[in-house]
């Protein structure tokens, strides 16, 4: 490795020691006989001092530009006034890669650029401390998601992403030309995770999924990350419990392990209540009607209505359960005591649906009936239906939109900021 | 949850306790006054006894077929002759889902079906104890892959899978119709992981990747899992060290946590030598020439040649390093002391390449030169090249074919067996 130390991890106890650091020139201050370079690497920021007496390094430093990549060998000097309480007094300086000036996006300051500019100049945008914090928080949160599920005897699965049949009808699918035949990109691992729950009972997956979203909103991506859970011998109440416990575990892990990143984002993580408040769809409709919204049983509850519910309920996180059966996909199980309603839930964060789950149908004749009533072609689902002849257990599950969930973890307001290289109707590069 | 216990985890110490188990009927033996059901769930197998005196359950059990899903409440009875030393004497039996007979594939016995049949009847195939073991070992191995990298300050990234430009030229890409425009499925996260190493230095990803493979071999899939690592301020030797340490960590974790699964597969994990043997490409060519192979500098070393090397070297795992520069992709860095050769490696398991890595070019003019010499269009790589104007550090990385690596972990000989629902030229369902 070219470097042996991370700049923000060097402590005053290392006073007098030699270190080798490398990273990006965050800012440069010129004090005549001294140059102060704020160096940035994955650990954060640290101060480098180049003295005039070190002729070679000082000469080289005259050429330095912001975001240039440098390698510095130097001696640690404890200094209370410096960031982290230390400065590195450079003995050797090497410019590994010199950046052009001016930069198309400022990395070191408060960002004033609009989202379009930021996404166009995305690599520089991702080098901002705020976005590095988002990347690290996401990594930690997903790590915690998996860790909790491993601890509950879940197994990670990898389902196919090129599929022959639309999961929930043919809308919003991206076609793929597959050896001359038409195929599609999976909208979700739904049917495959159900089948695998019919093998090893408790499965999860975190993987890309695609929807050809025409709408340009802060909550939609064409390519998103889906965190999926499916459990045999479970129903939707069990799944809501698992979601609560998983979220709680994730929040605690991120709170403990990403203190610095949360501070950079100036974000406080919410407490996850156990249980998270659960209201029925019918109750939600009543609340909305009382608030003067023109809505009736059977209508969708979208972001505008969820804004009102958020206000009325005074809850940042809540489940809406027991949705009308006809409003949910064919694999959703109806409530046995009231088949107009289904054993289903959406998890809402403020006014954004971040997860959707249900008990699933596990009897072939019921699945066929539900497909038929939705005008879907039973024959094209035979690859799925077939297995219900050979012992499929009752099962239930949930799909979580990861970038939406990351709004809760980062405080960001737009999933396009959270996706590293977002894809939408107008964005295919970078 | 419908069940409270996993059948293979019930121990003789629970003698006399009531348990509720559920799972699949693996086998049924009829002893006149008693029925013995071997029940299978995610934990393995356990024995249920239904006595004639329990009239209701006994009547129901007459209808039982293999792979039917049942729920059993019963009393644990320690019995040394039974599997795991216990039997469950059923008080209540419920058939949750009755399987049709006969099954299109036998789940309980040694499989005699050919691979085509197994992949067609895949859900039943995946219920065989051997395939459940494969799924669990893969989950554990990938968990260990990530855990090792987290411990080394790596961050998990999620790169876009729909891309505008071919990574290494246009061959073998699947076209996607993206809002009326042509786009492609990513062959690898190569260029994006390089950019992200230019942000937070140490990144990894485990995600699907696609190649339109025309060839039908035991080592190729159209959709495969790629485990990718990219590190700033590192070269190919650093990456080989990381690969060794990661593999060693994975092997130890799987050995400790999947003893039962390895036994089912009758597979012994290899020891990972540190260092893993490294031979140069030139040495490999010499060995092959001495063995009478008609090969010269610049030729590819494929599976037939690797079979000979495996024999001559007497190594199950070895690196071939320093490949001819022209044989590697444009982003591969040349050796400074011999530009005909590159700072590159392949990791070979027996006679299959399981990983490929290199030091990367990080100077724009070098990248442009390499693109040009390969007849690639510089303009279409501008989304990537642009960032090399703004401070890209020296970096290096590796891509690992997960299903190929799983051959080492499971002893299976064909990646189509390892992929849960493999995709190849003739397979798009199930």
Image (tube, coloured by chain):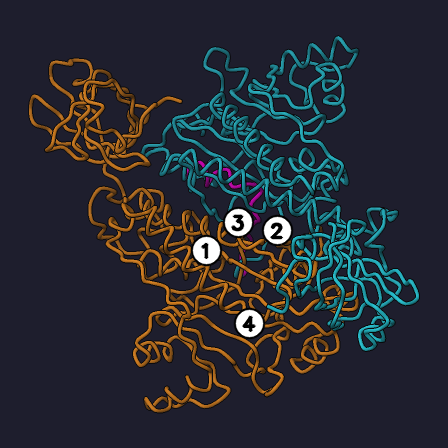
Chain colours: A orange, B cyan
Residue A204 position, x and y percent, is 57, 56
Which quadrant does the N terminus of chain A fall into? top left
**Disc ID at residue B161:** 3
Residue at position x 69%, y 23% in the image: B316
* Residue carrying label 2: A158
Residue B9 image position (x, y, % from top left): 66, 53
Pick whichever, B11 or A27, lies toward us.
Answer: B11
Whole-Å distance between the Cαs marked 1 and 4?
32 Å
Which residue in the structure is indicated by mark 4?
A: A236
Q: Is residue B179 above or below residue A12?
A: below
Front disc: 3 or 2: 2
Camera-side residue of B96 and A81: B96
Mark 2 lies on a secondary structure that is: loop
Marks 3/4 in contact by CB < 8 Å: the verdict is: no
Residue neighbourhood size for the residue with mark 2, other residues' Cα within 10 Å, grouped as few (<14), some (14–19), many (≥20)? many
| Contact (Cβ within 8 Å) of mark 1 with mark 2 | no
Residue A382 shows up from this direction? no
* Residues at discs 3 and 2 both on one chain: no
**Highlighted magenta segment, given as a residue range:** B180-195
Q: State which tag comes first along the sequence, 1 or 2.
A: 2
Alpha carbons under labels 3 and 4: distance apart? 32 Å
User: Numbered disc 2: what chain?
Assistant: A
> Does residue A318 belong to the magenta stretch?
no
| Residue that carries the numbered disc 1 in the rendered image | A423
Q: Nearer the viewer, residue B89 or B64?
A: B89
Chain letter for mark 4, please.
A
């Amino acid at each position: 490795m070219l470097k042996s130390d991370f700049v923000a991890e060097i402590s005053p106890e290392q006073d007098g020691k030699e270190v080798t650091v490398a990273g990006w020139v965050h800012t440069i201050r010129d004090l005549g006989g001294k140059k102060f370079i704020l160096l940035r690497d994955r650990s954060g920021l640290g101060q480098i001092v180049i003295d005039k007496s070190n002729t070679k390094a000082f000469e080289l430093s005259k050429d330095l530009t912001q975001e240039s990549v440098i390698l510095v060998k130097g001696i640690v000097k404890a200094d209370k006034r410096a960031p982290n309480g230390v400065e590195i007094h450079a003995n050797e300086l090497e410019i590994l890669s010199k950046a052009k000036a001016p930069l198309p996006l400022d990395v070191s300051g408060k960002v004033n650029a609009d989202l379009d500019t930021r996404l166009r100049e995305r690599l520089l945008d991702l080098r901002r401390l705020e976005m590095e914090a988002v990347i690290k928080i996401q990594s930690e949160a997903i790590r915690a998601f998996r860790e909790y599920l491993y601890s509950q005897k879940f197994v990670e699965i990898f389902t196919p992403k090129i599929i022959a049949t639309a999961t929930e009808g043919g809308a919003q699918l991206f076609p793929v030309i597959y050896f001359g035949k038409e195929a599609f990109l999976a909208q979700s691992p739904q049917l495959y995770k159900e089948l695998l729950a019919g093998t090893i009972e408790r499965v999860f997956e975190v993987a890309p999924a695609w929807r050809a979203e025409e709408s340009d909103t802060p909550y939609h991506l064409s390519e998103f990350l889906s965190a999926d859970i499916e459990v045999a011998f479970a129903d939707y109440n069990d799944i809501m419990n698992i979601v609560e416990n998983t979220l709680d575990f994730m929040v605690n892990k991120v709170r403990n392990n990403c203190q610095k990143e949360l501070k950079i984002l100036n974000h406080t993580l919410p407490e996850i209540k156990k249980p998270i408040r659960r209201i029925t769809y019918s109750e939600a409709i009543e609340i909305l009607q009382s608030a003067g919204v023109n809505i009736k049983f059977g209508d969708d509850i979208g972001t505008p209505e969820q804004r009102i519910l958020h206000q009325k309920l005074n809850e940042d996180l809540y489940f809406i359960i027991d949705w009308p059966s006809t409003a949910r996909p064919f694999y959703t199980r109806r409530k046995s005591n009231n088949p107009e309603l289904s054993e289903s839930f959406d998890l809402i964060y403020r006014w954004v649906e971040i997860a959707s789950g249900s008990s699933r149908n596990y009897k072939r004749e019921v699945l066929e009936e539900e497909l038929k009533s939705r005008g879907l072609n039973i024959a094209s689902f035979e690859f799925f239906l077939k297995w219900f002849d050979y012992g499929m257990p009752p099962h239930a599950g949930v799909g979580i939109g990861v970038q939406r969930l990351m709004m809760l973890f980062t405080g960001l307001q737009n999933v396009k900021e959270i996706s590293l290289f977002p894809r939408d109707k107008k964005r295919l590069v970078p």
